[in-house]
Image: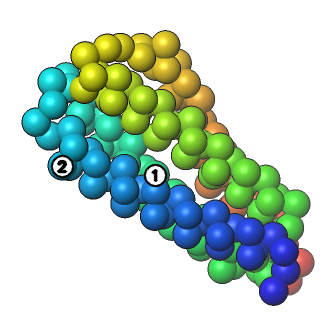
Amino acid sequence: MHAMPRKLLILAGLLGAAAVLFGAFGAHGLENSPIEPSLLDAYRTGAAYHLWHSLALLGLASAWTHLHPGLARAAGWCFGLGILLFSGSLYGMGMASAAGGSASFLGPVTPLGGLLLTAAWVLMALSALRAKP
């Protein structure tokens, strides 16, 4: 197995496990906390996007031999950083609210993470288009 698909599979596994843990914490740890309802919804959105994009990394690694390696590598980086920024910022704002504080400074980070996730999907498509038949 090539080094990059192996790294992506490891990353997908670790990020997938983290998504389950963050999702469980949101369902059980934040449910009865003083978190603002809109931030609880945002936290749940972060957990869902986290899990879905972890699965996208799994698909990227699985399809590696059919993709342009440079573009696929860039897609992998964008998926990983996008999850960190998008979901991480939503987790941070939710947990800060649950603790009675605010992390509103993370608000502008969320759309940047969303742009990276979007770029990852586009890069994955381009890597398939540019792959050698």
Residue 116 image offset from top left, x and y in percent: 63, 40
Reply above or below: 105 against 50.
Answer: above
Residue 87 image offset from top left, x and y in percent: 46, 40
Nearest to N terminus: mark 1 or mark 2? 2
What residue do we see at 59% from left, 29% from top? 112
Reply above or below: 28 against 70.
Answer: above
Measure the alpha-carbon separation of dots 1 and 2.
18 Å
Residue 56 image offset from top left, x and y in percent: 55, 64
What residue does disc 1 label? Answer: 50
Q: Quadrant of residue 46?
A: top left
Q: Nearer the viewer, mark 1 or mark 2?
A: 2
What residue does disc 2 label? Answer: 28
Left or right: residue 21 versus residue 77 is left
Q: Between residues 82 and 15, which one lies in front from this camera angle? A: 15
Left or right: residue 124 versus residue 3 is left
Q: Between residues 67 and 59, which one lies in front from this camera angle? A: 59
What amino acid is at disc 1? His
Left or right: residue 7 versus residue 31 is right
Helix, strand or loop at mark 1: helix
Q: Residue furthest bottom?
A: 1
Helix, strand or loop at mark 2: helix
Reply above or below: 27 against 6.
Answer: above
What residue do we see at 37% from left, 50% from top? 22
What residue do we see at 15% from left, 31% from top? 33
Name the image colouring: rainbow
> Is residue 129 among the parts visible in the rendering?
no
What amino acid is at disc 2? His
